Image (cartoon, rainbow, N blue to C red):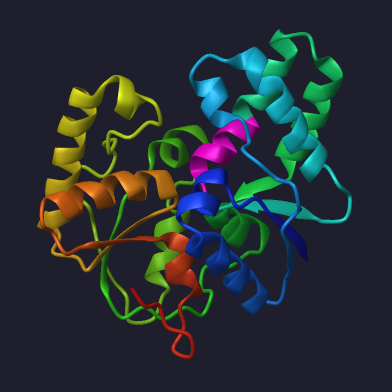
Amino acid sequence: MRIALLTTCLADAMHPRVPEAVQTLLRRLGHDVVVPPGQTCCGQMHLNTGYARQAVPVVRHHVETFESASYDVAVVPSGSCVGSIRHQHGSALRRLGHEGLADRADAVAGRTFELSELLVDVLGLDDVGAWFPHRVTYHPTCHSLRMIRVGDKPTTLLRAVDDLELVELPGQDQCCGFGGTFALKNSGTSTAMLEDKVAAVSSTRSVVCTAGDSSCLMQIGGGLSRAGDPTRTVHLAEILASTRERPWSP
């Protein structure tokens, strides 16, 4: 299968190991991975903060970049970006009178998948041949949990990883407090939510906290670091890309 990778602007700028891990994993599974040149932000941050008109050229560029017939599906290592592509693009464009572009956006959204969705639902896998000999806890991010509803797909994949010890995270359905600009506009509330999440992660005595969104891992990782907790934050893609031959390293 030929798969287009949306790296996400956050991962591209701050967590480049994540899209690299997605490529490593999918190529190991025998798929052709392409990274469409010229891709930028999907427009989520504009839409989430109420700048729908300003988001139109950003969304148009995303559609033009990913509507190519030269690939079968697109994969995104971010539940929040998939949520925006799937649930915000078409509806926002229609509200602003861009019907034709909205139809094209819906077509792109229809073949865009979050990583665990792609692996389990599209490729029919639960064991990707990974090896990760560490104690791990999983944080289900808000958008993946409530918006695109990936359910237990990430934990199904994690349980199949050789030598990985998966520990349930207390209060796992609670937000980490990031929420994009929420963390800036409501810093006090965000900090309190993060403190609760850090305490929950610490209570698991895990070596690694994983999730499907780099943004949430950035938030949680910052809180753990400031608390002096040695737990590392590692994206799901990095764990699934790790093998005995090419093991994950901090």
**Depth check: 49 or 207 in front?**
49
Verify whether residue 64 appears in magenta.
Answer: no
Is residue 200 placed above or below 104 in the rendered structure? Answer: below
Name the image quarter holding the N terminus: bottom right
Residues in magenta, as a range: 78-86
Residue 23 visible, this angle:
yes
Please give the count of numbered marks on the rendered protein. Answer: 0
Seen at 62% across and 68% down, the residue is 23
Pinpoint residue 149: horizontal percent, then vertical percent.
Answer: 49, 40
Is residue 36 placed above or below 219 in the rendered structure? Answer: below
Is residue 72 placed above or below 98 in the rendered structure? Answer: below
Seen at 42% across and 83% down, the residue is 247
Residue positioned most to the bottom: 245
**Depth check: 249 or 161 in front?**
249
Verify whether residue 81 appears in magenta.
Answer: yes
Seen at 61% across and 24% down, the residue is 88
**Relative side of 168 to 204, left or right:** right
Type of secondary structure dominating the magenta stretch: helix
**Relative side of 235 to 27, left or right:** left
Pinpoint residue 54: horizontal percent, then vertical percent.
Answer: 64, 17
Pinpoint residue 61: horizontal percent, then vertical percent.
Answer: 76, 34
Name the image quarter holding the C terminus: bottom left
Residue 149 visible, this angle:
no
Seen at 44% across and 57% down, the residue is 154
Image quadrant of residue 167? bottom left
Pinpoint residue 113: horizontal percent, then vertical percent.
Answer: 63, 48
